[in-house]
Image: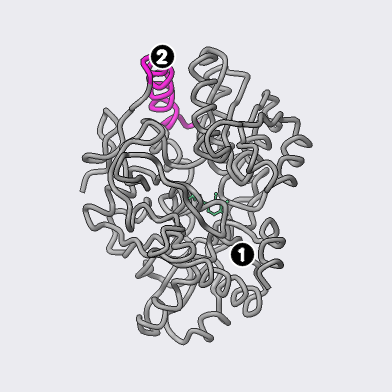
Amino acid sequence: MKILPDSRGYFNEFGGKYVPETLMFALDELIEIYNKLKHDREFKKELYYYLKQYAGRPTPLYFARELTKKLGGARIYLKREDLCHTGAHKINNAIGQALLAKKLKKGRIIAETGAGQHGVAAATAAALFGMKCEVYMGREDMKRQALNVYRMKLLGASVIPVDSGTRTLKDAINETIRDWVANVKTTHYLLGSCVGPHPYPSIVRDFQSVIGREAREQVLKAEGRLPDYLLACVGGGSNAIGLFHPFYKDKVKFIGVEAAGRGLKTGMHSAPLNIGSVGILHGTRSYLMQDSNGQVRETHSVSAGLDYPGVGPEHSYYKNTGRAEYVTATDREALAAFHTLSETEGIIPALEPAHALAYLNTLAKKTGKNKIIIVCLSGRGDKDLDIVRKKK
Ligand SMILES: *Cc1c(COP(=O)(O)O)cnc(C)c1O
């Protein structure tokens, strides 16, 4: 099994670089420096210094004894990305890319954000390295996520409202790409998930693979063997691919959980791998949610981080080759799992990984007591308390 992408950025028929000519130079520059730095000991040392001393790595692999007991099946471990600085896995990638930007001698970072989580991670990394940071955000999202807008401002970033289209994430991404085209000499586009044109899907995967590398070592130490299942929620797919990738060649089953929203039949969901079709969005070829005219469809999920119409090309490749299985959980199932974990383990999860936790009801019971499951607990739930409170 060869590890993709190929030199042109393809995972078989997925991926690639579908961008305006003016960005080809920037992507090629990024590919060149990244290919050099990813094997560079000094760079890796510097990156790990910040991941450890600043972001709080390694995160624990916690045996969820009470949850295991409650579900009565497989042994469940939680990879505690919720304990990272800023409360989620996104900081791993933000620090990595900000360091890359530093090496590229680019003093300005731009980013796009939907719920504001990636904007906060990017603003944090920019503050850490003394860089200027501007974050595009749909005006609608700014209203819904006022606290994160304020957080970004506290961190010294400016937030630029986007008034085109539906005034949400996909429109903010379009604006960020436009800005990058105009300012590519001085600016790094800090992309938040394993989506977008080559080399972003592999860069983000590699920076997030610290999750799987640690988990692999930790489970071997705790159990003396590899797990049977890895389970993670999939928005763009970065926490999932970060957990999966270091186990790629092992006999371990990968399961990604997409957001079924109000139900797959209602059309109000965010599950491109389950019922999307192949197309091009934001510079990459992958599964996405589009209508019969190729117009991107609106998505819905109770968790803002899963509310994206596309998915990383490597997941599309995993789906078509059968390397991973992709299932769904509804808003309601995720909310129930949110409460279950809070009550049984004293850990309030973000609503995104609550989708992965929800699938444990099916998986842990189906598999016997001698099986091991690792779930990526990608973030903590503090940011979601208002949403959950209103649902009660
Ligand atoms: C953003 C976010 C996600 C979804 O992004 P991926 O790229 O799919 O990982 C999942 N969990 C949390 C906590 C998030 O903030």
Amino acid at the residue labelled 1: Pro
Q: Position of residue 334 (x, y in %)?
A: 53, 68
The residue under the point 62% across, 36% down is 137
User: Foreground residue, 203 or 150?
Assistant: 150
* Residue 209 visible at all: no
Which stretch appears magenta?
20-41
Q: Position of residue 21 (x, y in %)?
A: 36, 15
User: Foreground residue, 214 or 334?
Assistant: 334
The residue under the point 54% across, 31% down is 190
Write down the quadrant of residue 265 in the picture: bottom left
Check the image and tell me how it is coloured. Answer: one colour
Secondary structure under badge 2?
helix
Secondary structure under badge 1?
loop
Q: Is residue 340 above or below residue 143?
A: below
Q: Is residue 198 magenta?
A: no
Q: What residue is disc 1 on?
A: 349
Q: What residue is disc 2 on?
A: 22
Circle 2 crowding by C-alpha within 10 Å: few under 14, some 14–19, many from 20 = few
